[in-house]
Amino acid sequence: MHKIGIIFRREYLSRIRNKSFIVMTLIGPFLMALFYGGMIWVGTEAVNSTDNEGPKKVMITGQYPGLTSIPNSESFAFESSSLTVEEAKNELNKSTVDLILNIQDVGSGNLDSITAYSLQSLSLRQERELRSQLETQLHRSQLLGMGLDPMALDSLRQGVELHCQTISDTGDAQNSATTLKSGIGFVMAFLIYLFIFLYGSMVMRGALEEKTNRIVEVIISSVKPFELMMGKILGVAAVGLSQFLVWIAMGAGLITGLSRFFGPQMQEGLQSTQSMQGAGSQALQTSINLWDQFHSLPFGKIIVVFVVFFLGGYLLYSSLFAAIGAAASQDTDVQSFMLPVSLPLVFGLLIAQASVIQSPHGSLATWFSYIPLTSPIVMVVRSPFDVSWLEIAGSAALLYGTFVALVYLAAKIYRIGLLKYGKKPTWKDLYLWIRQSN
Amino acid sequence: MSILELDSISKTYGNQIVSKEISMRIEPGSIHGLLGPNGAGKTTLLRMMATITKPDSGRILFMGEPLVDRHAHQMGYMPEERGLYKRMSVVDQLLFFAEIKGLSRAKAQGEIRRWMQRLQMTEWINSSSQDGTKNRVKQSKKLEELSKGMAQKLQFLCTIIHQPKLLILDEPFSGFDPVNADLIRDIILELRDQGTAVVFSTHRMDNIESLCDDITLINHGSPLFQGKTMEVRRSQFAGHHDLAIAEDQSSSEPPARWTEHPKFISVFKSSEGNWIHRFQCNSDFSSATLLNMGIQAGRVVHFSEHIPSIHEIFVQSIQAQNHA
């Protein structure tokens, strides 16, 4: 243990004293905010840029009673035409219209099909909007045909604000805040995914660097390869945790600052909404609800699960990454081993996206939150959704148990691999190294 | 008691035998040279001594006890392929290696100061940190700021900083410039005089003859011969005598006078220009008989017993075994 401590200290101090590490720790959260902000901006900008093109001119050919006149929208301006489809296609070629809608009525008064012709493919959004407009218009004309006033029917529609609450064991009702929980769970899972790769490859590069620098032979004449590997893994883990602590402190400072600044304003807003109606107060109410939901989240559990599963996942994967680094002789050797080792992590993220957010307590999400190679991602996404402590403890026990077993195998590869140079190892070599006694 | 005793150790990698029943003893206050061509198994043998790998069979004793990992604290090992942490300072590097060898931080600080003065390395410590406090060294240059020669000195210092009882050096002089090679050689002798046992592999035969008390020559993982350096020299090719008589030195072709003699071995030209004939003397053909043969042939200008150099023994033994 003493040797692990010495290796741990060297790894930790040499990395946190590194200028680039200090800079990244300080500006990392801002870069990440910039990244997400950029993604949102790009998404919004994409919609706006399409909208800026102005409405597309749509020529309707063929006849169907309900679709003789369709109201214009921001995206489409409709006009009926007596031209045949072939004649209309010429208009399309002359660019006087952007789109032709050919409506085919089989003569029985039933709509057979509608075909849209255009020179350029419609975007998914435009296609969806056009379909929706046509369906709405058909619906309205059918209502009119039945003698019903669509406007009157619209006025009968009433929006409902659904407040989902969950009841805890003590009987307290809490805001279920599904969207917020999904968002937070997914952001945490993505962070774990990112940092397992980031810190895991730090361990891998460290092992490879020591091997290519030829320093490793000197070290393992005094330190067991297992101690060297564990010291390195734990040292980098401490670097990661230090970075997280700094970021949590920065985040806590930001939230405290925001609470002090916006808290009183929200209280005032809440009082004024009770006596006010309108769009402005509605938006403020939504913000207040979001703020309340945020405060109602089980932060204690979320942070514990995040730290436990981040550490467990990191330890599990970094022991594999360390073995890869020790087995390789140069950077290019690493690639073929990286893919199969990192696939379960990528798969976990896919499960988190596809299943957990849809159904956090479904069997797929539940099982993958127990499997150690995916649990660091899947359990973390599930954690805000009232997962019992027993489930969390069981999954964590499996994760750490698997880590112990894997670290034993990884250490065997590490021990032999460190002294092998030249030939790129194969999977068979790794298997033989595991079986080799010394 | 021997510092290290190898008793019939063998090691195999896959189907390849890299060490085959090797036995040797390393005594305190002595230097043991390990000789052998490339791929003979020297590095594997040194790694087994340094606890990096373990033999498949046989046993290694360290001061009478079966060799275990904790004995590594009392050893210093410098591999042929060297390396240190590039971005780590000289002092941090030395502290790190001293600590993993079991030295306390305070003692390591004292040793670092002492050795850096001894090796004239104090200028590597930044002047701003030389605050005059005893046994404390602070900031120092990083490895990447050092020249190759300086880095090599540092590497050697990392190996001996904890005052090991056994020093295991794989090709210790390779890569060193002559000045640093002499410095390392002096320190090795100094450590030997203080009781440290040293075992090293080398291709430089001059080092073997001038440094080693004992030698072991291995080829294909097996020992060819071993013993005290002078005894080995005397025992190998025993009875070889050189004879030269005054004759025409301008000839580029060696004289054919004795080439058909049954005890003739070889003929070559000496630096003085004499044609030296080498014969194998034994009980049937004594050195006196050989000298008489020379006197009868002409004026004898050279007659001596030939004690082979380690270089000759090395080359001839390896060639003989490879051709066998």
Image: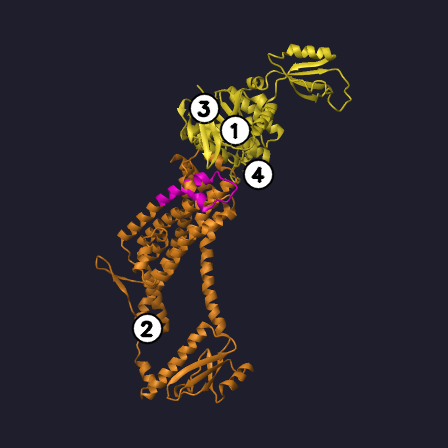
Chain colours: A orange, B yellow
Say which of A420 and B292 sits in front: B292
Asked if the residue under mark 4 is in contact with the one under mark 3, i.e. CB atoms within 8 Å, the reply is no
Going from N to C along the chain, the mark reached first, 3 or 4, is: 3
**Numbered badge on residue B4:** 3
Return the chain for callout 4: B
Query: Is residue B175 left or right of A304 when viewed as pictured?
Result: right
Which residue sits at x=63%, y=11%? B286
Which residues fall within the magenta stretch? A403-431
Residue B252 location (% of width, % of height)? 75, 24
Of labels 2 and 3, the one closer to you: 3
Same chain under badges 2 and 3? The reply is no
Of labels 2 and 1, the one closer to you: 1
Same chain under badges 1 and 4? The reply is yes
Asked if the residue under mark 4 is in contact with the one under mark 2, i.e. CB atoms within 8 Å, the reply is no
> In the image, is residue B287 above or below residue B316?
above
**Numbered badge on residue B169:** 1
Q: Which residue is mark 4?
A: B145
Query: Is residue A219 left or right of A306 when viewed as pictured?
Result: right
| Secondary structure of residue under mark 3 | strand
Instruction: Tell me the kind of residue under disc 2.
Output: Met
**Numbered badge on residue A276:** 2
Q: Quadrant of the N terminus of chain A?
A: top left
Spatial CA distance of label 2 from label 3 is: 92 Å
Spatial CA distance of label 2 from label 4 is: 71 Å
| Secondary structure of residue under mark 1 | strand
Residue A296 location (% of width, % of height)? 30, 59
